[in-house]
Image (cartoon, grey):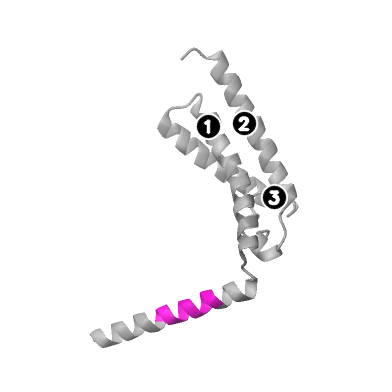
Amino acid sequence: MLWMKYWMETRLRFLVAVFVFTAIVLSGLLPFNAGRYAFTLFACLAACFSLSTFLATFMDDVWQIWGSLIALGVLRGFAALVSLPQTIDPFRVVGSGSPFVTHAIPWGAIIVCLVTTAGLFAGAIKIVQTRDY
């Protein structure tokens, strides 16, 4: 039965390679699209990082991690519940609003993320300045 396992693994690898290659060719994955996606992902993940930094100013390390995860989960649930427009929804940027799918940079979501980042970093700076470490 070892030959069957090897044959199935080889076929599976071949099918995965064909599907990945086809997806790359059909989606027009060029370095320019990858650069767009990297820029978009960086801008939107900066908001997650700033939330974690903000929580780190007044929470313990473990609670900071859990607080970040819970806050992001609540925000994602709220965004799904309210049904934000796709142009400003930062959670759709990695899915249906991705530059790989739309071939355009979602500026609305990036601006929302960067404004959120600036606000959370400003709050973290204020907390650090007022606290005596």
Q: CA distance from mark 1 to mark 3?
A: 22 Å
Front-lying residue, 72 or 132: 132
**Marks 1 and 2, the one that precedes in the sequence:** 1
Residue depicted at 52% across the width and 78% down the height: 19
Q: Residues within 10 Å of mark 3 (few under 14, many from 20)?
A: many
Front-lying residue, 41 or 58: 41
- Residue type for callout 1: Thr
* Mark 3 vs mark 2: in front: 2
Mark 3: secondary structure:
loop
Residue 8 lies in the magenta-colored region: no
Give the residue number, with chain letter if any, for mark 3. 89
Res. 68 mark: none
Q: Residues within 10 Å of mark 1 (few under 14, many from 20)?
A: many
Circles 1, 2 touching at the beta carbon (< 8 Å): yes
Magenta segment, prevailing SS (helix, strand or loop): helix
Q: Which residues are magenta?
A: 12-21
Give the residue number, with chain letter if any, for mark 2. 120
